[in-house]
Image: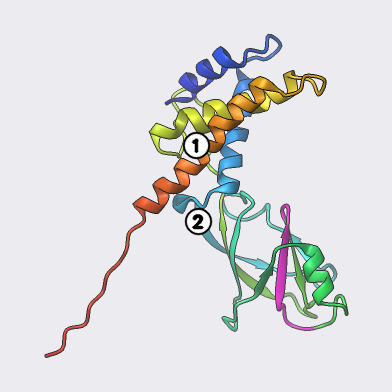
Amino acid sequence: MTLDEIRTEVMAIALEPSYDDSDYDRWINSAIQEVAGRVIIPDLKRINVISTSTTYAYVTLTTLTDGFAGMLRRVRRTVSGDDVGIYAKLEELYDEYTTWNEAGDVEAVALEGNYLWYQKLPAVAQSLTVMYTAVPPTLTLDADVPIFPSHLHRKLCVHGAAKMIWDLVETDIEKPKTQTLVNETHFENGITQYREFLARSKRHNITSTWSY
């Protein structure tokens, strides 16, 4: 489906009279961004190098090549090649490193939003190699097509945008938010199907050694 086709379908199931095409496009791209933040999309994997600060225990990842979609896969000290531990939350990193900002090489990190927190704090800026998921291409032209498989465009893009719009339209007084829930169900089903599709499509490289 093209952006024009997606927009037309979103307008059919989540019409908001005050919205123009650019508003609908914004919600469509927001839905695409949400998918990229929840599904490991092979085409969006990137590896880049960042530098730590000598003053603060964090750096922003918004300047990474092709942007940062919110999913961090690996972190490694560039010079030594040593892997750096990744904590699920900043609180866990903080609890582990009770002597906060102790001088030394980076040993562990925690991702919070677009900020990468780390401990220890290098006295000299240290290079870290990160593997991450980049931001998916923004749909701007009517003929643009999402990065996802075509059979999932409707569930991920149409219903993904519609659930966000309905969530604003249906007030908190309206419980349950019927249209929000209907579109969210389709969207979540699309997320599941996308993960299953990627699992089936993964190539398995088989190597064998012959002895003579």
Any part of residue 30 in sight = yes
Image location (x, y in percent) of residue 170: 74, 19
According to the picture, the residue beneath numbered tag 2 turns out to be: 45
**Residue for point 76% across, 23% down:** 175
Residue 193 counted in the magenta span: no
Residue furthest out toward the right = 99
**Residue for point 76% across, 79% down:** 124
Image location (x, y in percent) of residue 162: 61, 24
Q: Amino acid at mark 1?
A: Gly
Magenta-highlighted residues: 104-114
Whether 107 is drawn above or below 45: the answer is: below
Q: Nearer the viewer, residue 138 or 190?
A: 190
Q: Amino acid at mark 2?
A: Lys
Residue furthest out toward the top = 17
Residue furthest out toward the front = 176
Q: CA distance from mark 1 to mark 2?
A: 21 Å
* Disc 2 element: strand
Q: Quadrant of the N terminus?
A: top left
Task: Check disc 1: other Cα within 10 Å, few if <14, some if 14-19, many if 20+.
Answer: many
77 relative position to 3: left or right: right
Image location (x, y in percent) of residue 165: 67, 23
Q: Quadrant of the C terminus?
A: bottom left
99 relative position to 14: left or right: right
Any part of residue 28 in sight = no
Residue 190: give its label.
1
